[in-house]
Image (cartoon, grey):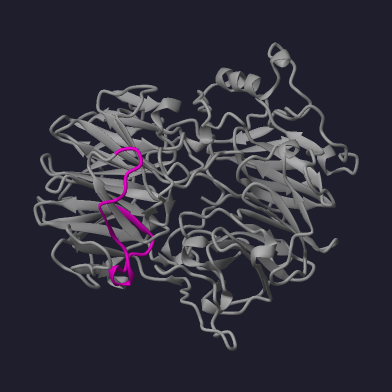
Amino acid sequence: MYKRLPCWAMALAVVISWAALSHSRADERRSQPFPEDIPAARMVADPYPALNGIAVDAENNVVVASDPNRKSLLLYDRSRSTSEGTQTVPVRQIIGPETYIGMVAAVVVDPQRREIYTANNDIEDTVVVMPYAASGNAKPARVLSVPHQAWGLALGRSSDEIAVTAEIFNAVVFYRREAHGVEAPVRVIRGPKTRLADPHGIYWDDAHGEIAVASHGNFRGVIENTGGGCAPAAGKEQTASESGEFRPPSIAIFSSRAKDDQAPLRSIEGAATKLDWPMGIAEDSLHDSIVVANNGDNSILIFDRQRGGNVAPVRVIRGDRTGINRPMGLAVDAKNGEIWVSNYGDHSALAFDSAADGNVTPKRVLRSAPAGTSTPGFGNPMALAYDTKRGEILVPN
Amino acid sequence: MAPNRVITGQGSKLGRTIHGLAYDPVHDEIVVPNALADAILVFRGSANGDEPPIRVIQGPCTKLVTPHSVSLDLEHGEILVASLTGKRINVFRWDANGDVAPLRVITGPETKLGHLVGIAVDPQRNLMAVANSEDILVFNRTDDGNVAPRARIAGPQTGITDEPWQLQFYKGKIFLAASNHLHVNLYSGVTLKESSKAVPDDPWLNPTLGFIGVWNITDNGDVPPRAMIRGPFSGLLHPVGLALNPEDGEIYVSDSVRNGILSFLVPDFFEPKADKPSSDHKE
């Protein structure tokens, strides 16, 4: 395996040092670019951290956010708030090639052991564990290989496990909490009865022995789709094949001991729920509710924890005063009665009163860039197209 | 800077893992695969917000398996779809809608198709090419079934190591975003492979950096690129997305490490003279 090198694209000097590696030793002192080393005429990128996952530790007064844009973890003072729209200085930022932090999504914290867990969503296929004290280009305490497209993370204190959602496999994968390196899962929730479809956020409710999972509804089968088609081939036995479908978004609540193709205890699903790309979710023990970062319509939905089916949220935080903008991560601080949400569209994290309802202003705001700083909103853009009619570059996330 | 518009939300039927798309200037439409729902979505060219697609290709008859990238044959009115995990290329009519059968499917052991992440078609020369696991495979445009590629561009002279990504055709030339990131998958689905022994290094830290390479469509074998963009001044680390704007002489490139888009002004790349192999490019 290759030697690890410092290559986060943060500074031109670092980039230039990599160049020496890609040319011969005789070229190392060359100051002129090679003919093919053509400078870019323009670049669209966000120089600031973009906040995705969020976690709160009331005991240690810490808020942690994951940043897939600059590939970092940011630790903030929980009680701090930005003033006059300025950028909030983090207590620490964990960033650099030794960290294993890449296209990170969810983040959770273990206040007792003072550890941060974060899931690398695409390509890296790892869960990275960092001590609270880590800073800069720190090596992780543990790195665990997980299935492709991991997004959500949850810690089970009672069973001492971690749970990871895997989008493309419609699955929740469980490991020993201290698992590291290459270690097989201890169990998996997966199968047609689970109704999991492109799962994202997950929380673990130890008090009630439940796990809840937010699904977007994109479904491509749990038996491998072989592309066998819709008609049996003449004279041949048709192999099992499933095709894709769009299901409604949902929150599925399972027993925390569920495994294999086990059905959820109940599921929140249907038009009345207003679910729209549900991302991070959390349980609010103070209000016995489930709180959802509803990315598609820039809202936070709050549901009665004990109800299932096509139920309306009991409260909705939404509107121009809220500042909610493409919410991704969500965490509940039951001790201080607060809901935290991270905005991928606005370089910010917001703290609301956990009893908030309607078009309300947040109690506090953390900013990873000055207020009003726009963002392209990129999340690992891996294809492009050019719209010749409008002169626009089309970018998928 | 903020985007001009964003197609997003549940109503769009988009997933949040979209790794391909194409624009159709004839019908003013955007074609997007949703690999997590085995679907192809077609939007109005001016679509915005939580807008539903005007057509959806999805269902067992489509034989779609993790559709990952798309290319449009505007001359023959076809959508070509490359599969990430299904080792296949499906071809549909441009206006296909619903659970419809493909016009053609290239699949089978002779095809050498593996991990496909890019596809392009040249209707004038009746050729198509795919970015395969570690090579470029060229097929006849009308190939169907278990057919061998007519050409394979691969080898140390090409500079391509792992996961060549999006590619485009223009006037007999293949433009490729050669990512050269090193992705090692330790799992088969959610099952750990027996061969998995250690956590790989971060795939984006592969010191063999990626590049933009240009080949002739008639190239075959271990052929160096005939034009390149790479190196520290270029800002490219591991480029993946690629779009062409020949009218303005520009190439647009996305780079996952930078999480951004770079624009290169290279009008000579679109001229016939860019046909000599690049010298001293090999690492």
Left-right relation of B166 to A106? right
Q: Which residues are magenta?
A: A180-201
Residue closest to the far top: A29
* A13 to A337, vertically: above or below: above
Q: Where residue B76 appears, x then y in whole percent?
A: 78, 70
* Residue A196 on the magenta span: yes
Left-right relation of A283 to A135? left
Q: Where residue A373 appears, x then y in whole percent?
A: 46, 35
* A123 to B48, vertically: above or below: above
Q: Where residue B104 appears, x then y in whole percent?
A: 69, 74
**Residue A281 makes an appearance in the image:** no
* Residue B143 on the magenta span: no
Left-right relation of A300 to B143? left
The residue closer to the viewer here, B5 or B107, is B107
Q: Where residue A162 appears, x then y in whole percent?
A: 24, 46
Count of numbered marks: 0
Left-right relation of B127 to B185? right
Residue at point 70%, 36% (across, down): B159
Residue at point 37%, 47% (across, down): A146
Residue at point 58%, 84% (across, down): A233
Which quarter of the figure has residue A29?
A: top right
Which quarter of the figure has residue B61?
A: bottom right
Residue at point 51%, 50% (across, down): A397
Residue closest to the far front: B194
**Residue A395 makes an appearance in the image:** yes
Residue closest to the far bottom: A235
